[in-house]
Image (cartoon, grey):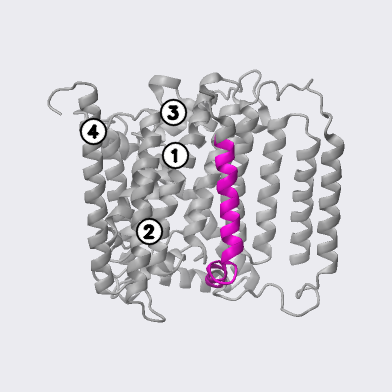
Amino acid sequence: MQQAIFIILALLTLGAALMTVITRNLLRAALWLVATFFGIAAIFILLRAEFLAVAQILVYVGAISTLIIFAIMLSRGIMDPDQVRFNGQWGVVGGFAALLFVVLAVIVTRVPWPAAAGGAPVGDAPADAIARLGAAFVGPYAIPFEVASVLLVVAMIGAIIIARERE
Amino acid sequence: MDYLRNFFVNLARSWTAWIGGFLPDWGVNLVNYLVVGIILVLMPVIATLTLTWMERKVIGRIQNRIGPNRVGPWGIFQAFADAVKMLIKEDIVPSGADKPVFNLAPILIAGAAALLWAVVPFGRGMIGQNLNIGALYVVAVGSITTIAVIMAGWSSNNKFALLGAFRVVAQLLSYEIPMVLSIATVVLVTGTMRMGDIVERQVAPFIVVLPVAFITYLLAAAAETGRAPFDLLEADSEIVAGYFVEYSGLKFGWFYIAEYGNLFAIAAITTTLFLGGWRGPFVSVAPALGPFYFVIKSVAVIFVLMWIRGTWPRFRIDQMLAFAWKVLVPASLANLLWSAIVLQIGRQPEQLGPTIVQMILLLVGNVAILAVTGLLLGRAARRYAAQHGWAGA
């Protein structure tokens, strides 16, 4: 049963992801991306990771895709279907995308996942999982957490400086 | 009498026993889930049919009119007449509209309004799903509205609709922050995100313990749902009707249903977080009273929101964003910080909810924050008046 639901969700998510890449209309692509995020949130729920699912919707659907859509709406000419689809940097971007795929594939196949080895039973998250997640964020993982925040602040200040009107 | 005392739970038990007589276990589960789901999905529709009438009556009285009075006694069937009118209207899709997106937007916005009801506790044990992330779920589902509004505004191929959608992002994203901070204060004080447990641990209603969080949440929620005086998304005098200007018939109706469903939902969530939910006198004797207290408190909150709408002029967009970033965010941040300090002071292990001393300390801090905020606002207003040379400031 769970397997069947997972396959359906995975197909929907992958289909939406594919549409994101191949749609000519950029705004529709962004909306397909939203559908992909919803699919990923559903898979999180299937894996009993409710917190991640809700965070996924809150951050990606609620905030990030909104910003993406705004960037699209405010860029001139970007919605024109006659726009060339590739610029001079497609090789670099493609290379990085391929590299990312290889890295992720290596991580997924090489790391000994406890669930795959039949260690921890899948679908039995502890009742206080969220409390433990929160404690981990301010305990052992405090420094990575703070570094991520600093990175976001840097990005934000950088964006303000770039976007600011010159005096 | 004993049956009535816990009427809703007993009703559910007899219903389950009755259908259990001829259905297998999984069938009983399926039917029960469907029934609960249908009731929750119908909540926005019920809210629309009742609250539109209430709103028109309340606003009417505030404006010295009597409001709807033709259809039925006191005009109570006005909403049904309007619903029929909406159903028989022609469905118009503007030329140049992005049709699939145009059709999807009302569904998404009404779906988001219905989803909120899944975590609202109507009484002890009367909750769709007592999610362990309930409070966060409320915020996340609320944020889906942003995307739906943008879809509606963009796909309409209308500049007023698009302008309305542009305003949405500034408004909804800004007011999400004070809203999350005020919910976080409640979560911190109760130590749980389950909506059911938040009510259980609310010995005293949090409106008297955390008034800053209550006021912040109510204002931010009014802004999130685009209620006046924060109705810049659909400011009639500026951008016609904003993001849903091109919608007609039942699709317009879905936006209407979403608006009133959200209004009822934020009132219900305010009741849950700050007014003690279904708690009230004699609830421990007769749990069936819980839902009644819950509805009465929710309707009181709705009345306050309508009262605000009837008496306040609309904000300008810059005033509105300044209010969120310069008043609500600092005040709720200070409140969150103070709550964290107070809770850390006399903390006992395995403590559920705040102690009396902690509650008094929280209240003192909240009153101080309110006083400082009021003082700073008054000073800013005087400075502004002096700059413009206004007399009597």
Q: Is mark 1 on a helix, strand or loop?
A: helix
Q: In this view, does B164 lie to the left or right of B203?
A: right
Q: How many marks?
A: 4
The image quadrant of residue B99 is top right
Q: Is mark 3 on a helix, strand or loop?
A: helix
What residue occupies the far top of the structure in this picture?
Answer: B95
Give the labeled residue for mark 3: B234
Give the labeled residue for mark 4: B381
**Chain of the residue where label 4 is placed in the rendered structure:** B
Q: In this view, does B304 lie to the left or right of B192?
A: left
| Image quadrant occupied by the C terminus of chain B | top left
**Magenta-highlighted residues:** A131-160
Give the labeled residue for mark 1: B259
Mark 3 or mark 2: whose residue is earlier in sequence: 3
From the image, state whether disc 1 or disc 3 is nearer to you.
3
Give the labeled residue for mark 2: B336
